[in-house]
Image (cartoon, rainbow, N blue to C red):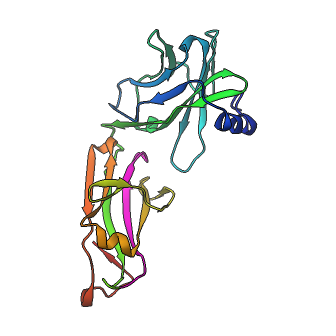
Amino acid sequence: MAIPSVTCFLLIVSISSTSQFTVNQYKHVSVAEGNSAILGCFVEGEEIWHLSVQWFKQLPGSPPTYILHHANDTTIHWGDTSLEHYRPIRNNSNTHFLHIANATTNDSALYWCLMTKSPYLHIWGDGTHLSVYGGEDVQAPSVSIMTSLVSPTSSHPLYLACSVSGFYPPVIEVTWKLDGQSTPGIITSDHSLSEEDNSYSLISILELPMHHRKNISSVSCEVRHDSSRTLITKDYLDCYGDQCKLPWKTL
């Protein structure tokens, strides 16, 4: 089903417009399978009753799909979804909620809210990662770090690859940390699906220039998979000398 009132033109306008209000969402929500999930969209600078709200669901590597539209006249339009599964809630605390009943691992995804005040003012929330745990199909990830071979005196960048495999559902967070401070990997592979066991894998790559290697004392890859209640941290240890025989060394 086509997403109503959201076109490329309007998305460009929403980015370039000066925001008259701000929209924020929970960063993470985690619930047990079979329970209800409540996702919040919080508005500052405008009354929630003046705004129309749309919700979207996005799986890794896929575009967002339309869930519903809750107009400011209280009418509700659903996409190709069950109205018993998704329900919108608007309250007096300037918050709009998406209620997901009887959540399953298949509901694990990134959810976006979009607030509309006029045909030319569309403000997106910053997204909520929903992770549903306790399902029989949940699989915890395996994590390893590989490094390119660069000598301590080389001026070439050092590349670190954090390989994450065997996890389901696909909602996962991979963060590199330099001396405990978060930093994004410069290259992240798309989620790939294994046909054998219906699990996902990805690789995140971090580039460490020479000046960074001299000024930092610790590098680690942190993987958070809420559906399996898993938090794994892999530390990087320099690999030099005769032990490094391959183009990539697994740590």
Establish if 225 lies above or below 215.
above
In which quadrant of the rendered image does the C terminus lie?
bottom left
Establish if 49 lies above or below 59.
above
* Segment tinted magenta in the rendering: 154-175
Residue 26 magenta-drawn? no
Q: Residue furthest right?
A: 9
Tell me how many marks there are: 0
Residue 168 magenta-drawn? yes
State the residue in front, 159 or 44.
44
- Residue 25, by quadrant, is top left
- How far across and down, in percent of the image, does residue 173 sit? 38, 49
- How far across and down, in percent of the image, does residue 79 sit? 63, 27
Establish if 90 lies above or below 248.
above
State the residue in front, 244 or 10.
10
Q: Is residue 8 left or right of residue 101?
A: right
Q: Tell me what residue is drawn at x 27 percent, y 84 percent.
A: 240
Q: Is residue 81 left or right of residue 132?
A: right
Establish if 71 lies above or below 142.
above
- How far across and down, in percent of the image, does residue 12 sit? 70, 39
- How far across and down, in percent of the image, does residue 15 sit? 64, 38
Q: Tell me what residue is drawn at x 51 percent, y 27 percent.
A: 23
Q: Tell me what residue is drawn at x 54 percent, y 14 percent.
A: 48
